[in-house]
Image: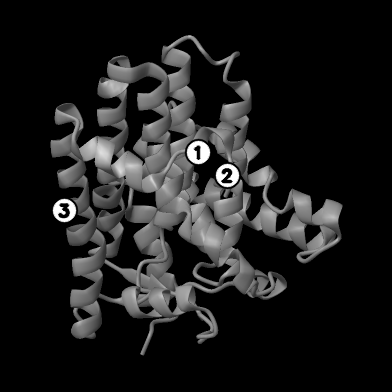
């Protein structure tokens, strides 16, 4: 995915981060958290069926979205999407950006722990095509047992990357100068969100859940107004290109995503814990045998 803000080598950025004393500890902690709260938790549940309930969260509108294997690259870009932001910050601002880069890494680590509050109580899955014609899909099927759909970490990370990037740029007083970069990050987050649906790793329900999670994770950066704007932009480009989903289906998908998001938000205001509306929703869905 080519964005001006992301024109940095992923490998070089990772090396630079590991050799920057102010960032090394946070990076190692982030890797540890991802392994513990995403991979190990999921593998444990997959190895011991029944340990954690697993709900099927498909929605009929998912059928309106075609399976597009060509989008797998964008889907897998979500790590590069946020890691290269650090490279951009370090290159442009140098040592002045180390504190912001550290916070950026820490916040990504915290997202995994935050989402795991749902996964540890009730996991979820969707109907995923058994597609093995592409090495990237083979890797996905091997590495991902597909039990952590609600909330979608892909979408959470994409949203956090663009909103946090925008906040950091504002803190440097460069919002006007870097307006194109901010727009590129926003567009990238939308494309990653669409990609998770095109490659059938998530349901439209998972998008609503991820948006809700982000509105509770950091309300000032992703309030309902921001969520509404984000949701309204999904699949807009398909209308211009005359591709699926078509104009009417795109409208129905956006309406459903925002309606379910509003439902989660309304229930969240009355809930004892932020994850309660998602757990309640999962319990109403069919259970995986």
SS type, badge 1: helix
**60 relative to 6 in the view: left or right:** right
What crowding class fits label 3: few (fewer than 14 Cα within 10 Å), some (14-19), or many (20 or more)?
Answer: few
> Nearer the N terminus, badge 1 or badge 3?
1
Q: Residue at coordinates 67% horizontally, 70% vertically from top-left?
A: 61
Residue underneath mark 3 = 32
Q: In the image, what residue occupies the spot 36% across and 33% down? A: 86
Spatial separation of the CA atoms under disc 2 and disc 1? 10 Å
Between 65 and 161, the one nearer to me in the picture? 161
On the image, numbered disc 1 is attached to which residue?
A: 6
Q: Earlier in the sequence, mark 3 or mark 2?
A: 3
Dots 3, 2 in contact, CB < 8 A = no
Residue 124 rendering spot, x and y as whole percentages: 38, 71
For residue 273, side relative to residue 65 (left or right): left
Query: How many residues crowd around disc 2 within 10 Å: few (fewer than 14), some, or many (20 or more)?
Result: many
Count residues near mark 1 (Cα–Cα under 10 Å), then give few for <14, some for 14-19, many for 20+: many
Instruction: State the colouring used for the structure image.
Output: one colour
Residue drawn at the location 25% of the way across and 36% of the way down: 17
Image disc number at residue 160: none
Mark 2 or mark 1: whose residue is earlier in sequence? 1
Would residue 212 be visible to someone looking at this image? no
104 lies above or below 285: above
- The answer for how far apart the CA atoms under marks 1 and 3 are is 25 Å
Is there a contact, CB below 8 Å, between mark 2 and mark 1? yes
> In 3D space, how far apart are the residues under numbered discs 3 and 2 (Cα atoms)?
26 Å
């Amino acid at each position: 995915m080519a964005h001006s803000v992301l024109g940095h080598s992923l490998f070089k950025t990772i090396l630079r981060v590991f050799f920057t004393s102010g960032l090394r500890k946070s990076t190692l902690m982030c890797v540890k958290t991802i392994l513990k709260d995403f991979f190990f938790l999921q593998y444990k549940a997959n190895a011991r069926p029944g340990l954690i309930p697993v709900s099927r969260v498909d929605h009929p509108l998912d059928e309106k979205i075609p399976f597009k294997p060509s989008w797998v690259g964008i889907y897998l870009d979500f790590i590069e999407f946020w890691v290269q932001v650090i490279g951009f910050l370090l290159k442009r601002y140098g040592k002045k950006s180390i504190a912001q880069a550290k916070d950026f890494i820490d916040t990504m680590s915290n997202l995994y722990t935050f989402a795991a509050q749902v996964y540890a109580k009730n996991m979820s899955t969707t109907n995923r095509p058994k597609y093995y014609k592409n090495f990237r899909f083979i890797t996905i099927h091997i590495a991902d047992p597909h039990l952590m759909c609600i909330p979608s970490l892909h979408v959470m990370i994409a949203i956090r990357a663009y909103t946090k990037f925008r906040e950091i740029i504002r803190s440097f007083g460069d919002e006007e100068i870097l307006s194109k970069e901010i727009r590129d990050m926003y567009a990238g987050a939308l494309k990653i969100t669409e990609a998770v649906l095109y490659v059938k790793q998530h349901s439209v329900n998972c998008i609503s859940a991820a948006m809700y999670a982000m509105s509770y994770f950091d309300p000032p950066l992703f309030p309902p107004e921001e969520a509404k704007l984000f949701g309204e932009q999904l699949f807009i480009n398909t209308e211009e290109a005359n591709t699926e989903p078509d104009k009417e289906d795109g409208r129905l998908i956006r309406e459903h995503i925002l309606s379910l998001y509003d439902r989660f938000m309304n229930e969240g205001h009355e809930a004892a814990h932020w994850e309660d509306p998602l757990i309640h929703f999962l319990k109403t869905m069919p259970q995986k045998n």
